[in-house]
Amino acid sequence: MNTLDLAVSVFVGWQLIWSLVAFIAIWHDKNLAAAHRWRISEDRLHSYEWWGGWLGSGLAQRLWRHKTYKESYQRVYKRAALMWLAACTLVLIVWIVSRLNA
């Protein structure tokens, strides 16, 4: 495995771990809301998205219909998702180009 392959593997692993964290956090926050208990702060949920959990958060939001209509939440979420989507696209392009040049 060369250095680029290792870096891509770490990048994907990072995304998967933080997506799982964010997915569970959204699920837990939804359950807390249903039980009328203290909730997970939006800042904390967003921090999971900014750290790389944007995909897991987005999937959980859609699956449990949680935070999907709150515009202020969605604005921040969409910024994080767009940034990570751009990073994923860049990593994929670099990886494909390196494969074509090998």
Image (cartoon, helix red, strand yellow):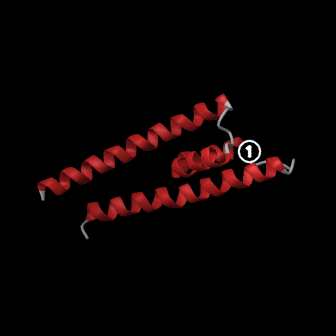
Where does residue 94 sit, x and y in percent of width and height? Answer: 25, 49
Residue ID at (87%, 47%) = 36
Residue ID at (53%, 47%) = 54
Where does residue 40 sit, x and y in percent of width and height? Answer: 75, 49
Q: Nearer the viewer, residue 2 or 93?
A: 93
Q: Nearer the viewer, residue 53 or 50?
A: 53
Q: How many marks?
A: 1
Q: Residue furthest bottom?
A: 1
Where does residue 5 sit, x and y in percent of width and height? Answer: 28, 63
- Hey, which quadrant is residue 23 in on the image? bottom right
- Amino acid type assigned to the residue bearing label 1 in the image: Ser
Seen in the picture, residue 79 relative to 101 is either above or below; the reply is: above
Left or right of 28 on screen, residue 18:
left
Left or right of 96 on screen, residue 40:
right
User: Callout 1: few (<14), some (14-19), or many (20+) C-alpha neighbours within 10 Å?
Assistant: few
Badge 1 is on which residue?
41
Seen in the picture, residue 56 relative to 6 is either above or below; the reply is: above
Residue ID at (53%, 61%) = 17
Residue 81 visible here: yes
Left or right of 87 on screen, residue 61:
right
Q: Residue furthest top?
A: 71
Residue ID at (69%, 54%) = 27
- Hey, which quadrant is residue 25 in on the image? bottom right
Q: Residue furthest right?
A: 36
Kind of element beneath mark 1: loop
Task: Indicate the quadrant containing the C terminus: top left, top right, bottom left or bottom right.
Answer: bottom left
Residue 51 visible here: no
Seen in the picture, residue 6 relative to 78 is either above or below; the reply is: below
Task: Indicate the quadrant containing the N terminus: top left, top right, bottom left or bottom right.
Answer: bottom left
- Hey, which quadrant is residue 69 in on the image? top right
